[in-house]
């Protein structure tokens, strides 16, 4: 069986461009919620002096991550910023002093065993850098090593435009190797599969040459069919195993980790500098000079775009991430986050939502869904609030990759409908549970 | 500062649109339209013109009266008009052609909700309505030189096999029949175009034509003749592949095609009518929701063996 998907334009315009460090912004805004889970709680106050790498937010609870200052300077405000879609998060605003002095606390971690490794990964502040932002140390923390057959390194980078993972493989392969070595040494992992789309021949060649002596690392060049980098899709295509609905990769003996995340772990083990800057792709039809940049976390997007020559036409829509799953931001003052791998600015022609017409029942959506859902039927069931049917149609399985909406000739907003249908289903299930209790 | 637009992903869309799909179908129908003019004379063009014009006008008028969004630019009414004309004899009185077009658009398509919502193929249903209403003019097959000829399938069912046209004439379409159904060559060119452009998938036509071929062989009939006669090619490539009224799943399409083939053969060999393609498609249209439910893919929930 082959999973469906769709061919999307690659637009990897920046693949050959080495990232450049951007000019230091005057001020950075560092949100306390740059991960899945509870926001970190700020441990600095207004007027405090911070240096590069100073801890400014402590993890709050188990599923959380520490946050560090990306610049040296003075805390001017503990603010609450709006991330759009009604989400507000606390943020530490730091005025830079331009010196970029490293914090005295920074030292390479001493890692002698598995516990040390987990502690180090946790302290590094790293989260899933592919875009999901799940705290990485939790992913690596499990009791039963027997269950784990392989670590799948996600290097698919299937979204259009984005090339920051490409740059990791070309520029930081030594750090990637360090990450792999650490996992091998302290977790006893014997098999690593690097899943990569075959539209990156340079990376594939480099990886194959670099790991030619290492039999534990397999390079799996996969067809460039979106969404190759979706966790379920990647695990199926590399290991032929299906992650059960509501389950985790570990249920089928796998851990999936983004290539840049693993390379960062390698880097942290060597330098001890926590996650304070990101390589991001700046591209899109409105950007004058598309390029890869290295930006301190918290840099306002407006500053990032200025460093890419500004806009060549009126900017209409700006995205965190790629065009298929990226999030449209409400303001250019929002900052670069830990899991930001690209910022895309679109002009009106590229970014305008298409005109929606009536469904013609062509079946493109269901014939392109990697998870074999029927978005057409889900749309009908959603419109009539039929929770029971939505449950049968497994709308909660949807990963919102956007294939259905992409291939729809009537341009129906199927991802939006699926999101809404999920909440209808949740209500239906809660109601069913309550009724069950009352009886 | 510029105002930024917020919307839910994806922020890219493919360039495919309903109008482009319908335009491809129109393009695919053009070879058969040209063939019909060559074989049956200029009146063929007149019939096509009337059907297309009335289809567009009724769609526009109905939507105007019901204050619905105007959809004539999606070209689906043009497709319905062409297909209906292809299913009529060239000598059909023009008012009857106009009546059929009105019925196709208003009764079969718009009253059920317009494009994508109709459960039956508008052109086929209108043809069947017309066969019942105007049975005389719907079964008179006249050539440009005023000679008339029964359709090959009618000859076979009457046992007059001596008067049958040659294989070559069958392939080129020089025979009695509806104006767009006779030229196998032109229909194959159009069908191939739709397959290459991926407007249709091979499943339905292959299952439909394959079933007729196999059943004809089993029943001891002339297989090639059965494939080229009647409206099989037109039906298999252009009518049984209609999106709204046929299943969207792969296995659904195969079941649909096999069902169409079986009913066609049943009517041709044992029924009262010489031809059964229209009825087979209409009957299978009715079964479409059930076929879809039966063949819907199981979502990738995992937990079992691959």
Image: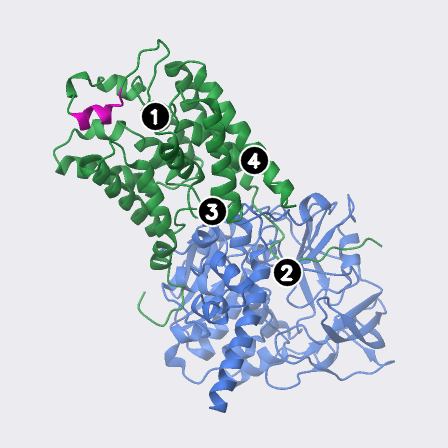
Chain colours: A blue, B green
Q: Nearer the viewer, mark 1 or mark 3?
A: 1
Q: In this view, does B96 lie to the left or right of A307?
A: left
Q: Magenta includes B156?
A: yes
Residue at screen point 16% across, 21% down: B160
Query: Which residues lie in the magenta part?
Result: B150-158
Q: Nearer the viewer, mark 2 or mark 4?
A: 4
Specify few, some or many for label 1: CA neighbours under 10 Å numbering under 14, 14-19, or 20 or more: few
How far separated are the C-alphas under marks 2 and 1? Answer: 71 Å
Q: Say what secondary structure mark 1 lies in.
A: helix
For label 1, the residue is B136
Q: How far is disc 3 from disc 2 in space, using C-alphas?
A: 46 Å
Q: Which element carries disc 4, helix, strand or loop?
A: helix
Q: Is residue B214 left or right of residue B147?
A: left
Whole-Å distance between the Cαs marked 2 and 4? 53 Å
Q: Nearer the viewer, residue A18 or B133?
A: B133
Q: Determine which quarter of the picture holds residue B67.
A: top right
- Kindly identify which chain the residue marked by label 4 belongs to: B
Do dots 4 and 1 share one subunit? Answer: yes
Q: Name the residue under label 4.
A: B58
Question: How far is disc 3 from disc 4 in space, using C-alphas?
Answer: 16 Å
**Residue A121, image x, y percentages:** 58, 77
Mark 2 surroundings: few (<14), some (14-19) or many (≥20) residues within 10 A: many
- Pointer 2 residue: A341
Q: Mark 2 lies on which chain?
A: A
Per the image, the residue denoted by label 3 is B118
The part of the image, by quadrant, that contains residue A165 is bottom right
């Amino acid at each position: 069986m082959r999973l469906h998907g769709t061919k999307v334009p690659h637009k990897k315009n920046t693949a050959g461009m080495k990232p450049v460090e951007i000019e230091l912004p005057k001020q950075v805004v560092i949100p306390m919620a740059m991960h899945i889970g509870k926001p970190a709680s700020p441990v600095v106050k207004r007027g405090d002096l911070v240096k590069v790498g100073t801890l400014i937010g402590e993890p709050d609870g188990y599923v959380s991550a520490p946050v560090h200052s990306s610049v040296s300077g003075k805390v001017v405000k503990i603010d609450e910023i709006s991330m759009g879609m009604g989400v507000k998060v606390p943020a530490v605003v730091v005025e830079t002093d331009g010196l970029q002095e490293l914090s005295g606390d920074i030292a390479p971690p001493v890692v002698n065993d598995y516990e040390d490794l987990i502690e180090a990964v946790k302290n590094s502040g790293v989260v899933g850098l592919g875009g999901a932002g799940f705290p990485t140390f939790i992913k690596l923390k499990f009791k039963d090593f027997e269950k784990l057959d392989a670590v799948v390194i996600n290097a698919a980078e299937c979204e259009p435009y984005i090339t920051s993972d490409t740059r990791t493989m070309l520029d930081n392969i030594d750090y990637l190797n360090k990450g792999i070595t650490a996992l091998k040494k302290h977790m006893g992992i014997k098999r690593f599969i690097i899943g990569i789309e075959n539209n990156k021949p340079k990376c594939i060649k480099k990886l194959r040459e670099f790991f030619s002596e290492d039999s534990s690392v397999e390079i799996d060049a996969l067809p460039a069919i979106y969404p190759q980098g979706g966790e379920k899709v990647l695990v199926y295509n590399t290991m032929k195993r299906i992650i059960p609905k509501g389950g985790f990769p570990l249920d089928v003996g796998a851990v999936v980790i983004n290539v840049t995340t693993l390379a960062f772990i390698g880097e942290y083990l060597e330098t001890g500098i926590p996650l304070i800057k990101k390589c991001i792709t700046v591209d899109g039809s409105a950007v004058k000079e598309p390029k890869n940049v290295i930006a301190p976390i918290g840099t306002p997007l407006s500053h990032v775009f200025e460093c890419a020559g500004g806009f060549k036409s009126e900017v209409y829509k700006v995205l965190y991430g790629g065009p298929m799953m990226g999030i449209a931001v409400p303001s250019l003052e929002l900052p670069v986050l830990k899991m930001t791998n690209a910022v895309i600015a679109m002009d009106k022609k590229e970014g305008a939502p298409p005109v929606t017409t009536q469904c013609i029942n062509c079946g493109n959506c269901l014939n392109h869904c990697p998870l074999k859902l029927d978005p057409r039927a889900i749309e009908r069931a959603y419109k009539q609030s039929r929770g029971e049917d939505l449950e049968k149609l497994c709308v909660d399985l949807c990963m919102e990759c956007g294939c259905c909406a992409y291939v729809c000739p009537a341009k129906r907003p199927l991802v939006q409908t699926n999101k809404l249908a999920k909440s209808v289903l949740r209500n239906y299930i809660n109601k069913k549970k309550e009724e069950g209790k009352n009886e | 500062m510029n105002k930024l637009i917020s919307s839910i992903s994806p922020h890219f869309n493919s360039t495919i649109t309903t109008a482009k799909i319908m335009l491809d179908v129109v393009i695919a129908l053009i070879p058969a339209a040209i063939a019909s003019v060559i074989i049956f004379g200029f009146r063929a063009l007149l019939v096509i013109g009337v059907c297309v014009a009335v289809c567009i006008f009724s769609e526009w008028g109905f939507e105007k009266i019901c204050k619905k969004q105007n959809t004539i630019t999606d070209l689906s009414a043009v497709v319905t008009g062409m297909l209906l004309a292809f299913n009529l004899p060239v000598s059909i009185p023009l008012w009857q052609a106009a009546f059929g077009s009105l019925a196709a658009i208003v009764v079969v398509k718009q009253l059920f909700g317009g494009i994508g919502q109709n459960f039956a193929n508008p052109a086929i249903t209108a043809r069947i309505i017309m066969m019942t209403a105007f049975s005389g003019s719907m079964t008179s097959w006249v050539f440009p030189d005023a000679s008339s000829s029964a359709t090959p399938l009618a000859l076979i069912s009457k046992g007059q096999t001596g008067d049958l046209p040659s294989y070559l004439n069958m392939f080129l379409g020089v025979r009695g029949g509806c104006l767009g159904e006779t030229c196998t060559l032109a229909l194959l060119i159009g069908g191939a175009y739709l397959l290459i452009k991926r407007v249709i998938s091979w499943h339905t036509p292959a299952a439909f034509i394959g079933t007729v071929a196999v059943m004809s062989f089993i029943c001891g009939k002339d297989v090639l003749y059965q494939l080229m006669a009647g409206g099989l090619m037109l039906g298999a490539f252009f009518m049984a592949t209609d999106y709204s009224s046929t299943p969207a799943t792969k296995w659904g399409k195969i079941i649909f095609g096999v069902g169409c083939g079986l009913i066609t053969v049943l009517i041709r060999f044992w029924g009262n009518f010489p031809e059964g393609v229209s009825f087979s498609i209409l009957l299978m249209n009715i079964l479409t929701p059930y076929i879809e439910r039966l063949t819907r893919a199981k979502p990738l929930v995992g937990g079992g063996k691959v």
